[in-house]
Amino acid sequence: MKTTLAIDIGGTQLRAAVFPENEDKPLRQKRLPTYVDGKPSLDRLLQLIHEVTEESETIDAIGIVAPGPINANTGVILAAPNLPEWAGVSISDLCQKEFGAPTFLGNDANLAAIGEWKYGAGRGHHHLIYMTISTGIGSGVISHDQLIVGNNGLASELGHVTLLPDGPMCGCGQRGHLEALASGTGIAKYFAEQLSNGRESILSGKPDAKTISKAAKEGDELALETFNRAGYYIGLAVANYLAIFNPSIVIFGGGVSQAGDLIMNPIRKAMRESVFSEHFLMDLELSYAELGDDVGLYGALALARESLGAIS
Amino acid sequence: MKTTLAIDIGGTQLRAAVFPENEDKPLRQKRLPTYVDGKPSLDRLLQLIHEVTEESETIDAIGIVAPGPINANTGVILAAPNLPEWAGVSISDLCQKEFGAPTFLGNDANLAAIGEWKYGAGRGHHHLIYMTISTGIGSGVISHDQLIVGNNGLASELGHVTLLPDGPMCGCGQRGHLEALASGTGIAKYFAEQLSNGRESILSGKPDAKTISKAAKEGDELALETFNRAGYYIGLAVANYLAIFNPSIVIFGGGVSQAGDLIMNPIRKAMRESVFSEHFLMDLELSYAELGDDVGLYGALALARESLGAIS
């Protein structure tokens, strides 16, 4: 039997799933912890693949989702603060040698985009933007049925664009990035600053974005303002991305999106008010991501199948 | 003989050129005024094509560059303040019926991008950003060897993204767009405002961007500051576009770019200081456009040949 292998290198678990050709349900799955005795291991990745596969099956391709930044063209993880042993290694080459199957690597946000495109909320679309708004803001873009990865495989960093030149510092060291303004971290930081400026709220200390969203739903003014502000900047960014990509769908994943209308209403409002022209709203869908915890595996599957299609 | 027809619908002239198959030099060219007695005319466009072509030749495709916005997928000009008779008409269908050749339409900035890619400064690149900085800021993007036009053919409006939410009003009615901050119009407007605020300069009144660039080269402080400011915002925008597209070349066209280092130095500085990560500067070229006044014809030629290749 011909199979495609999907691997998700996550912060706590390595997951592997075997998909029969032309089928979207896995035949078999395995998990191993990413860290043992505090150390990640490339050997354990290979072990996992050996354990999940069977001799009677032929692997036609392997797709791997890994934490970025990754050179998607070479399969090399460029920097991995939490996986130092893996940085600079071509995991694609490693797997290709060990298992004799073409291996394709992508970062988690890019592969979430391709996963949602092929198996989730974006099915049938040709121009899609995916944004995951959680601790950070990750993203991926499908344009003309093609995942945009660019010259060195690093493109589609929609969270790391300057939206407010004198805005708050981003984790990356630049100012006023969308991620600094509107990620979970950005939301918590703004809220804590307002509290320490003496603003009133039912909350105190340094609550996280989820706690702030609950307070907003209970009517806390500062919490509401905080989500309106984050939604405004996301909506402004989305308006920019409409002018840049003219997509037919924008898909929102990540914990902050799960606040629902609390964040989506200000996003929609700012997007409509800021869009370059009404034409960009024609046939446009805004949607929530559908694949949940399996988005990594489905992204890896989609990458493997798409890449194999492109080279065969 | 098989030929490809390139048409440039300009503000003052309609130009047409006939290119033999596989050749990049035109066999024949014709021009007609766009307006006669103050009126543009679709009939004159057809007349021009009849005049430039010969019975013995077979037209394999027609490429047309027109002022935007255009739905690149349908060949319909969506709005044309200066060509009201042409709005809402599918010029592609019209030409296809009259000449029996598949006809492809694109806006001037998108086609300048594809022209520079195939015949100008961008030859050999697969990921290219073109920006023309003149009265306005137009742009086009090639990503993975594909002109990005999006779902309704409207994409790649890199001049109409918000870069400074409370910034100056753009001609399109939105605030803080790159075009409002750094186009020739934006430069002239900022300079005039500073003068009327009592700032000193060797210039007075409402000089245009070209006059201001000359004053800057003569050492006028306010003129220098004005170009540094425009270059800063362009560089900031370019840094954003590197994170979004990870191109290997950014090409600058338009009158403001012809100010040379006066504008390019602050662009380079802001781009380097604002870029998300050093990886995006790897193998990156910044270049001036090469095709000059012929960019429209070469863009139309490239569009026709690329589109024909894609459908055949």
Image (spheres, coloured by chain):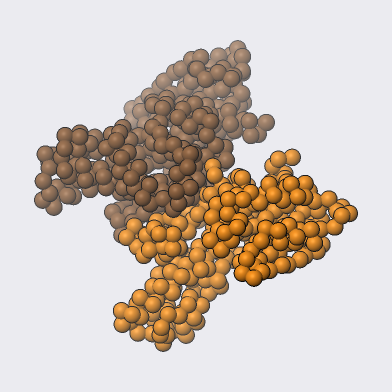
Chain colours: A brown, B orange
Quarter occupied by the C terminus of chain A: top right
Q: Give above or below for B299 relative to A98.
A: below
Is residue B85 left or right of B49 when viewed as pictured? left
x 59%, y 61%: residue:
B83
The foreground one among A177 and B301 is B301
State the image coordinates of residue B118 (x, y, percent, origin top left): 68, 55
x 38%, y 32%: residue:
A288
Q: Give above or below for B192 relative to B252.
A: below
The foreground one among A160 and A279 is A279
Is residue B116 left or right of B5 when viewed as pictured? left
The answer to whether residue A53 shows anywhere in this view is yes
Question: Which residue is the extreme one toward the front?
Answer: B37
Is residue A200 left or right of A297 when viewed as pictured? left
State the image coordinates of residue B184 (x, y, percent, origin top left): 48, 70
The answer to whether residue B298 shows anywhere in this view is no
x 50%, y 46%: residue:
A245
| Quarter of image, res A58 | top right
State the image coordinates of residue A254 (x, y, percent, origin top left): 35, 34
Quarter occupied by the N terminus of chain A: top right
x 75%, y 55%: residue:
B5
